[in-house]
């Protein structure tokens, strides 16, 4: 057995451990620390007896207090649902203009609609409803089928070109690749681009004015303002679903893309569709 070493400066014995000439003093733990440590042990034992703690084969010990976090959550959810029942009933019964006119109902519907949007709509329109190429931005003022609350509700409820709903909105631009020559398509694209900016070739755009008048004005209008009642896009607002370049426009003239939006009425129900409509309308782009 090795001889105990006493530190000359402190007068305390060492533990016998040494690192690079540094020896460890064998000081006792502070009393306050020891009592705190013992208290935590007692607390842990009491907690394990009072609350669910020990796992069993298919369950766990229930504890003397019979506490259940799942039951607490279930009770809280039931209380929240009961508190919202009156508001939900009012939304189900009232028309959309009355919901917007009632500040309490409007705020509740917009909040619930935001939650439904995050579950069902962000995959296409984005988490901020800013859209992406081929998927409309719901924050701007460009509405293909109208941005008033009733129009938004109709679009959400029945979709766009949705085969599963007889009331779906439907519009279709014919492909002009078989009706116009390649030069005529370039001319028309240059003219359409000139409605919102400077075309790459003014002479090409000038020639495209007649091509547009002969083939496009019947739907889009002479000045390209479109027609919301028919779902015809406005070509003069500098907002483009499939891209603003002349190449993008020419591609859409040659072989147009037609997106599909599902109708949500049957899947979510009228109350949730109303809430979605109020939320989308509240983004600021609604008319």
Image (cartoon, rainbow, N blue to C red):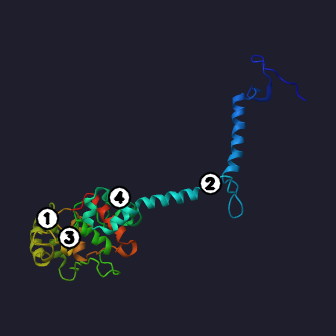
Image quadrant containing the C terminus: bottom left
Give the mark nearest the N terminus, 1 or 4.
4
Where is mark 3, residue-wise? Answer: 233
Q: What is the x, y in percent for residue 87? A: 36, 61
Q: Residue at x 30, y 59 (%)?
A: 106
How far is disc 2 from disc 3 in space, using C-alphas? 60 Å
Image quadrant containing the N terminus: top right
Give the mark nearest the N terminus, 2 or 1.
2
Numbered disc in front, either 3 or 1: 3
Q: Are marks 2 and 4 in contact (CB under 8 Å)?
A: no
Numbered disc in front, either 2 or 4: 2
Where is mark 4, residue-wise? Answer: 108
Q: Secondary structure at mark 2?
A: loop
Q: Residue at x 78, y 21 (%)?
A: 12
Q: Secondary structure at mark 1?
A: loop
Q: Residue extending furthest top?
A: 9
How far is disc 2 from disc 1 in space, using C-alphas? 69 Å
The relative height of residue 32 versus residue 176 in the rendered view (above or below) is above
Give the mark nearest the N terminus, 3 or 4.
4
Q: Nearer the viewer, residue 171 or 34?
A: 34
Numbered disc in front, either 2 or 1: 2
Q: Nearer the viewer, residue 75 or 257?
A: 75
Where is mark 1, residue-wise? Answer: 195
Where is mark 2, residue-wise? Answer: 67
Q: What is the x, y in percent for residue 174? A: 22, 80
The relative height of residue 10 versus residue 33 in the rendered view (above or below) is above
């Amino acid at each position: 057995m090795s001889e105990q070493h006493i530190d000359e400066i402190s007068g305390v014995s060492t533990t016998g451990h040494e690192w690079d000439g540094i020896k460890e003093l064998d000081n006792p733990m502070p009393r306050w620390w020891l009592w705190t440590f013992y208290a935590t042990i007692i607390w842990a034992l009491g907690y394990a007896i009072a609350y669910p703690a020990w796992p069993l084969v298919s369950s766990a010990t229930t504890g003397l207090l019979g506490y259940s976090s799942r039951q607490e959550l279930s009770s809280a959810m039931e209380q929240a649902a009961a508190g919202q029942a009156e508001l939900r009933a009012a939304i189900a019964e009232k028309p959309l203009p009355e919901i917007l006119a009632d500040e309490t109902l409007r705020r509740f519907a917009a909040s619930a609609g935001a939650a439904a949007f995050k579950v069902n709509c962000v995959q296409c329109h984005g988490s901020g409803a800013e859209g992406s190429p081929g998927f409309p931005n719901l924050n701007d003022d460009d509405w293909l089928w109208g941005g008033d609350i009733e129009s938004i509700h109709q679009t959400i409820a029945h979709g766009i070109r949705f085969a599963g709903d007889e009331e779906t909105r439907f519009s279709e631009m014919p492909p002009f690749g078989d009706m116009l020559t390649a030069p005529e398509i370039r001319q028309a694209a240059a003219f359409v681009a000139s409605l919102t900016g400077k075309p790459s070739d003014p002479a090409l755009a000038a020639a495209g004015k007649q091509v547009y008048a002969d083939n496009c004005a019947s739907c889009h209008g002479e000045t390209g303002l479109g027609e919301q009642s028919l779902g015809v896009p406005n070509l003069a607002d500098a907002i483009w679903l499939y891209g603003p370049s002349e190449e993008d426009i020419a591609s859409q003239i040659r072989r147009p893309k037609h997106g599909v939006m599902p109708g949500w009425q049957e899947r979510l129900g009228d109350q949730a569709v109303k809430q979605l409509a109020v939320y989308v309308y509240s983004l600021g782009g609604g008319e």
